[in-house]
Image (cartoon, rainbow, N blue to C red):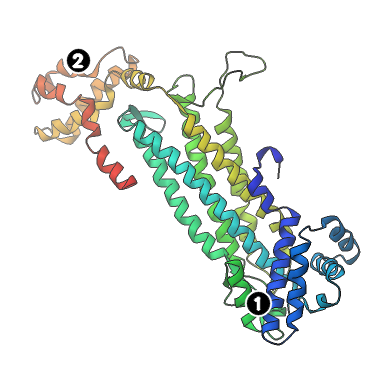
């Protein structure tokens, strides 16, 4: 992963030493249970744990040097441990196969990565909720197709984002549960040379569940689900990032990323304040989503096992989780420090001469006995004059001067339809649904 887009806690989870530590725990826990079952001496597990307690450092370079000869990473690790522990180490890996170690380790790493990501989501949700409450009734224009539609509040925009990321959190919890499975079932997964009790013991020690049928690998539909979930979260990140980017456009400028003292926006143009953080999040989301495709393609392995998935997961495991961790933290910072301009929101809403209230007039005319087709025609013919005047004309004034409209609605009735507060009467209801 590019260090620029990596945070220490998540990155450390994927370091070689962290991986080898999980490998050791799997082997030692398995040996421990084998001792209880009488398959190996009890002293074997004790020797492993005693060495581990006094020699916690993993010599990654030494293991890599052995692998350069053996061309097999798990054998290289077992050989190195045997060199440290001596005779008792021969009882490690009894009845196990490499995938038991590799797949279970990946499950541990993805489960632990999920815990970091869930913490990230909690921080993001807290930031969004704070801004939603702050701007619960800050009036702004809602847009459909990028065009002014009807009034909303900035708080409702934030509430929508909160609800979406809350769904993301629920999905990630489910994905974590699905990925957190353990396989210690031996060659082709039949338990021929190892008791299922060993798998249950290792799973319990590592906070996993035994895989019901592991063949020789944990089925990759679990991993496909996991990385697809990360991709969905990335899509939600981009959705909110794009909203900020649009709101920061010069012609809009209703909100913008915080611009710190001393920050420079352009090497050529000193006036520039660019949405670089949210643009970066769009790029990050593209990468995270791209990892879902190879995860889906990994599902179709040959028979009981092949390793076509292995090289893929060496990329996507670290890269997807590290990138998503970085992105969630970055988005939290953007929302937390987002500069919001209510006056500009109001000015943008006003510049269209009251067109945002057209639906209320349409409905009032129909309720006054005018057919929907005629009501639409009457409102639209006045609205288009306002549109073409670029807001220099006011819709309310034109409607008051239209004899066909005033034949159905009084001046007071028309003016009532231009009340901005009308649009916000159910904001509390929406907030109650979202925030409980």
For the question of whether residue 417 can be seen, the reply is: yes
Find disc 1 in the rendering and name its residue: 215
Dot placed on the residue nearer the N-terminal end, 2 or 1 = 1
Q: Which mark is residue 397?
A: 2
The residue closer to the viewer here, 56 or 303, is 56
Q: Are marks 2 and 1 in contact (CB under 8 Å)?
A: no
Give the residue at x 15% y 15%: 401
Give the residue at x 67% y 79%: 33
Instruction: Give coordinates of residue 417: x percent, y percent.
Output: 17, 26
The residue closer to the viewer here, 371 or 249, is 249
Q: How many marks?
A: 2
Q: Is residue 83 left or right of residue 111?
A: right
Q: CA distance from mark 2 to mark 1?
A: 76 Å
Is 105 rendered above or below residue 349? below
Instruction: Give coordinates of residue 272: x percent, y percent.
Output: 58, 17
Give the quarter of the image for residue 20: bottom right
The local secondary structure at tag 1 comes to loop
Give the quarter of the image for residue 129: top left
């Amino acid at each position: 992963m590019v260090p620029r887009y990596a945070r220490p806690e998540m990155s450390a989870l994927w370091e070689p030493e962290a991986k080898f530590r999980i490998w050791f725990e799997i082997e030692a826990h398995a040996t421990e249970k084998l001792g209880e079952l009488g398959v190996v001496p009890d002293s074997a597990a004790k020797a492993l744990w005693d060495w581990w307690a006094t020699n916690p450092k993993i010599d990654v370079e030494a293991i890599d040097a052995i692998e350069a000869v053996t061309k097999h990473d798990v054998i290289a690790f077992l050989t190195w441990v045997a060199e440290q522990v001596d005779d008792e180490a021969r009882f490690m890996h009894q009845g196990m196969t490499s995938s038991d170690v590799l797949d279970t380790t990946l499950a541990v790493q993805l489960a632990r990565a999920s815990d970091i990501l869930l913490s990230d989501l909690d921080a993001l949700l807290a930031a969004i909720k704070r801004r939603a409450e702050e701007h619960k009734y800050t009036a702004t224009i809602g847009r459909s197709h990028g065009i002014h539609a009807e009034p909303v509040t900035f708080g409702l925009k934030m509430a929508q984002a909160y609800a979406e990321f809350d769904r993301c959190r629920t999905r990630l919890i489910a994905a974590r549960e699905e990925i957190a499975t353990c396989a210690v079932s031996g060659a082709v997964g039949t338990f021929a040379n190892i008791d299922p009790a060993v798998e249950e013991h290792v799973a319990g020690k590592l906070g996993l569940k035994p895989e019901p049928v592991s063949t020789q690998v944990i089925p990759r539909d679990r991993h496909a689900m996991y990385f697809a979930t990360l991709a969905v979260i990335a899509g939600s990140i981009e959705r909110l990032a794009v909203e900020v980017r649009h709101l920061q456009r010069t012609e809009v400028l209703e909100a913008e990323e915080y611009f710190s003292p001393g920050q420079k926006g352009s090497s050529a143009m000193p006036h520039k304040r660019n949405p670089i953080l949210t643009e970066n999040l769009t790029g990050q989301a593209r990468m995270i989503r791209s990892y879902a495709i190879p995860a889906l393609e990994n599902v179709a392995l040959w028979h009981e096992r092949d390793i076509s998935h292995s090289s893929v997961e060496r990329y996507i495991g670290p890269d997807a989780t590290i990138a998503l961790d970085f992105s969630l933290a970055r988005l939290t910072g953007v929302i937390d420090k987002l500069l919001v301009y209510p006056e500009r929101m109001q000015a943008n809403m006003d510049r269209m001469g009251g067109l945002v209230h057209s639906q209320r007039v349409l409905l009032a005319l129909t309720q006054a006995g005018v057919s929907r087709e005629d009501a639409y025609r009457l409102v639209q013919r006045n609205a288009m004059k306002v549109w073409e005047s670029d807001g220099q004309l006011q819709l309310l004034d034109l409607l008051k001067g239209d004899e066909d409209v005033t034949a159905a609605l009084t001046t007071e009735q028309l003016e009532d339809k231009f009340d901005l507060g009308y649009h916000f009467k159910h904001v509390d209801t929406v907030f109650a649904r979202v925030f409980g």
